[in-house]
Protein backbone atom coordinates (compact mmCIF):
# COMPACT_ATOMS: atom_id res chain seq x y z
CA UNK A 1 0.00 0.00 0.00
CA UNK A 2 1.43 3.38 -0.92
CA UNK A 3 1.82 5.61 2.08
CA UNK A 4 -0.37 8.66 1.62
CA UNK A 5 -1.96 11.18 3.95
CA UNK A 6 -5.60 10.36 4.57
CA UNK A 7 -8.29 12.85 5.48
CA UNK A 8 -11.43 12.62 7.52
CA UNK A 9 -11.84 10.41 10.53
CA UNK A 10 -9.27 7.75 9.57
CA UNK A 11 -5.95 9.55 8.97
CA UNK A 12 -3.74 6.51 9.45
CA UNK A 13 -0.79 6.27 7.12
CA UNK A 14 -0.10 2.56 7.70
CA UNK A 15 -2.45 -0.41 7.63
CA UNK A 16 -3.30 -1.65 11.11
CA UNK A 17 -3.81 -5.28 12.04
CA UNK A 18 -6.34 -5.90 14.81
CA UNK A 19 -5.08 -8.11 17.60
CA UNK A 20 -4.47 -8.07 21.30
CA UNK A 21 -0.90 -7.84 22.45
CA UNK A 22 -0.90 -9.42 25.83
CA UNK A 23 1.45 -6.87 27.28
CA UNK A 24 2.99 -3.56 26.41
CA UNK A 25 5.56 -2.41 28.91
CA UNK A 26 6.69 1.17 29.10
CA UNK A 27 8.08 3.83 31.36
CA UNK A 28 6.28 7.14 31.77
CA UNK A 29 6.99 9.76 34.44
CA UNK A 30 9.52 7.36 36.00
CA UNK A 31 6.79 4.72 36.46
CA UNK A 32 6.60 1.39 34.66
CA UNK A 33 3.20 0.66 33.14
CA UNK A 34 1.60 -2.37 31.52
CA UNK A 35 -1.19 -2.05 28.97
CA UNK A 36 -3.04 -3.91 26.23
CA UNK A 37 -3.55 -2.84 22.64
CA UNK A 38 -6.31 -3.23 20.08
CA UNK A 39 -4.18 -2.89 16.95
CA UNK A 40 -0.70 -2.19 15.64
CA UNK A 41 0.86 -0.83 12.45
CA UNK A 42 4.40 -0.27 11.25
CA UNK A 43 4.05 3.30 12.45
CA UNK A 44 2.36 2.95 15.83
CA UNK A 45 -0.40 1.44 17.92
CA UNK A 46 -3.42 2.19 20.11
CA UNK A 47 -3.64 1.16 23.74
CA UNK A 48 -5.46 1.86 26.99
CA UNK A 49 -2.72 2.70 29.49
CA UNK A 50 -4.60 2.85 32.79
CA UNK A 51 -2.94 6.19 33.52
CA UNK A 52 -3.22 9.64 32.01
CA UNK A 53 -1.07 10.69 29.06
CA UNK A 54 -0.87 13.99 27.18
CA UNK A 55 -0.44 14.44 23.46
CA UNK A 56 3.29 14.91 22.94
CA UNK A 57 4.35 12.64 25.84
CA UNK A 58 7.35 10.53 24.81
CA UNK A 59 8.42 7.27 26.45
CA UNK A 60 10.06 3.91 25.73
CA UNK A 61 7.86 0.87 25.09
CA UNK A 62 8.43 -2.83 24.56
CA UNK A 63 6.09 -5.55 23.34
CA UNK A 64 6.22 -9.05 21.86
CA UNK A 65 4.33 -9.85 18.67
CA UNK A 66 1.87 -12.76 18.90
CA UNK A 67 4.48 -15.07 17.35
CA UNK A 68 5.98 -14.97 20.88
CA UNK A 69 9.43 -14.52 19.32
CA UNK A 70 9.67 -10.95 18.11
CA UNK A 71 10.32 -8.30 20.76
CA UNK A 72 9.83 -4.72 19.61
CA UNK A 73 11.52 -1.93 21.56
CA UNK A 74 11.49 1.76 20.72
CA UNK A 75 10.69 5.26 21.85
CA UNK A 76 7.11 6.32 21.26
CA UNK A 77 5.12 9.54 21.25
CA UNK A 78 1.43 10.12 22.01
CA UNK A 79 -0.15 11.67 18.91
CA UNK A 80 -3.81 11.52 19.96
CA UNK A 81 -5.99 10.38 22.83
CA UNK A 82 -9.63 9.69 23.52
CA UNK A 83 -11.76 9.09 26.55
CA UNK A 84 -14.59 6.61 26.56
CA UNK A 85 -16.85 4.75 28.94
CA UNK A 86 -16.18 1.03 29.16
CA UNK A 87 -18.97 -0.75 31.04
CA UNK A 88 -19.52 2.18 33.37
CA UNK A 89 -15.82 2.87 33.90
CA UNK A 90 -14.23 5.93 32.32
CA UNK A 91 -11.18 4.87 30.33
CA UNK A 92 -8.55 6.65 28.26
CA UNK A 93 -6.96 5.34 25.09
CA UNK A 94 -3.96 6.77 23.30
CA UNK A 95 -2.57 6.50 19.79
CA UNK A 96 1.20 6.46 19.71
CA UNK A 97 3.71 6.59 16.91
CA UNK A 98 6.98 4.71 16.96
CA UNK A 99 9.69 7.38 17.03
CA UNK A 100 12.86 5.38 16.43
CA UNK A 101 11.76 1.91 15.31
CA UNK A 102 14.64 0.66 13.18
CA UNK A 103 14.08 -0.52 9.62
CA UNK A 104 14.60 -4.20 10.47
CA UNK A 105 11.90 -4.10 13.14
CA UNK A 106 9.56 -2.10 10.87
CA UNK A 107 10.01 -4.82 8.25
CA UNK A 108 9.25 -7.60 10.77
CA UNK A 109 6.14 -5.80 12.06
CA UNK A 110 5.02 -5.09 8.47
CA UNK A 111 5.50 -8.72 7.44
CA UNK A 112 3.48 -9.86 10.47
CA UNK A 113 0.67 -7.40 9.57
CA UNK A 114 0.68 -8.61 5.94
CA UNK A 115 0.35 -12.24 7.10
CA UNK A 116 -2.54 -11.33 9.42
CA UNK A 117 -4.35 -9.50 6.60
CA UNK A 118 -3.86 -12.46 4.26
CA UNK A 119 -5.28 -14.81 6.93
CA UNK A 120 -8.33 -12.55 7.40
CA UNK A 121 -9.06 -12.58 3.66
CA UNK A 122 -9.03 -16.39 3.41
Image: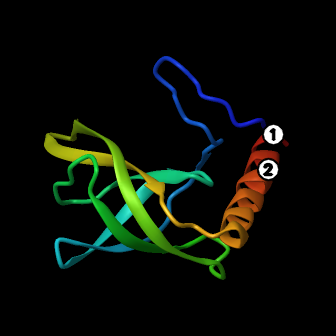
How would you rate the neighbour count of disc 1 (Cα within 10 Å): few for under 14, some for 14-19, many for 20 or more? few
Q: Could you say where residue 37 lies in the image, as x and y percent from the top left?
A: 43, 56
Please name the residue shown 81% across and 39% down the image. Answer: 121
Residue 50 is left or right of residue 117, and the answer is left
Q: Could you say where residue 51 lies in the image, as x and y percent from the top left?
A: 17, 60
Please name the residue shown 23% across and 46% down the image. Answer: 92
**Mark 2 — residue?**
119
Q: Secondary structure at mark 2?
A: helix
Q: Which mark is residue 121?
A: 1
Query: What is the quadrant of residue 72 in the picture?
Result: bottom right
Q: Could you say where residue 94 lies in the image, as x and y percent from the top left?
A: 33, 48
Establish if 100 lies above or below 122: below
Please name the residue shown 77% across and 35% down the image. Answer: 2
Query: What is the quadrant of residue 80 in the picture?
Result: top left
- Name of the residue lying farthest toward the top: 8
Q: Secondary structure at mark 1?
A: helix
Establish if 44 lies above or below 14: below
Q: Closer to the camera, 2 or 19?
A: 2
- Name of the residue lying farthest toward the right: 122
Q: Could you say where residue 122 lies in the image, as x and y percent from the top left?
A: 85, 43
Q: Which mark is residue 23?
A: none
Establish if 112 lies above or below 45: below
Q: Quadrant location of the N terminus?
A: top right
How would you rate the neighbour count of disc 2 (Cα within 10 Å): few for under 14, some for 14-19, many for 20 or more? few
Amino acid sequence: MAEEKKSGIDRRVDTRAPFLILEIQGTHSNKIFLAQTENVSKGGLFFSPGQSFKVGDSFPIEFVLPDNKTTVRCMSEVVWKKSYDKSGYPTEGVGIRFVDLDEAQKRVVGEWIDREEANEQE
